[in-house]
Image (cartoon, rainbow, N blue to C red):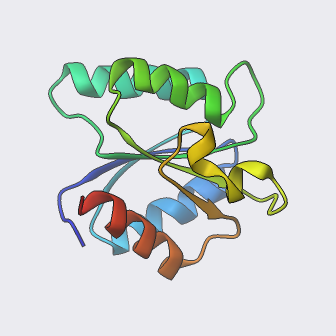
Amino acid sequence: MAKNKRVLVLDDEELILELVKDIFHILDLEVETVLDGREAVEIFKAARERGEPFDLVLLDMTLPGELDGAATLQEMRKIDPEIKAVVSSGYSADDIISNATKYGFDAAVPKPYSISVLRETVNRLLEK
């Protein structure tokens, strides 16, 4: 596992954010969580401006408000075109899970989360 890597996780459910935070801490990753797409973009931008950019973002696809996961990623890519991005969804039939790269993501992770799947996905993306 790539240590000292920073991950921003966006989901509209606090319980899921707590679960992912716990999993990523087990994987020795520094994690910041956020409930809203617009706020995620602001946190992402501020971290980059401070010289503490995120190495990876994990974005829930289905979110209330103006920015879903795909729209949030579009805004983040304007700030950092090279950011590694993982989409997640509880809807396994969702086209974005099977075709993540078509939507601009580097990988997809279905919910409910599996520690092994998250570990493998994060390792693969952060080791590049």
Residue under the point 18% across and 64% down: 3
Q: Nearer the viewer, residue 47 or 105?
A: 105
Q: Position of residue 118 (x, y in %)?
A: 49, 70
Q: Position of residue 27 (x, y in %)?
A: 33, 72
Q: Quadrant of the N terminus?
A: bottom left
Residue under the point 62% across and 70% down: 113
Q: Position of residue 68 (x, y in %)?
A: 69, 31
In the image, taking residue 108 as reference, residue 118 lies left or right, namely left
Examine the rendered structure and indicate whether residue 7 appears above or below residue 72: below
Residue under the point 62% across and 42% down: 102
Give the number of callouts: 0
Residue under the point 41% across and 74% down: 119
Examine the rendered structure and indicate whether residue 29 appears above or below residue 40: below
Q: Position of residue 110 (x, y in %)?
A: 67, 64
Q: Residue furthest bottom?
A: 116
Q: Is residue 36 visible?
A: no
Residue 28, image quadrant: bottom left
Residue 89, image quadrant: bottom right
Q: Is residue 48 visible?
A: yes
In the image, taking residue 101 as reference, residue 81 lies left or right, namely left
In the image, taking residue 67 as reference, residue 57 lies left or right, namely left
In the image, taking residue 3 as reference, residue 11 lies left or right, namely right
Q: Quadrant of the C terminus?
A: bottom left
Residue 109, image quadrant: bottom right
Examine the rendered structure and indicate whether residue 16 appears above or below residue 124: above
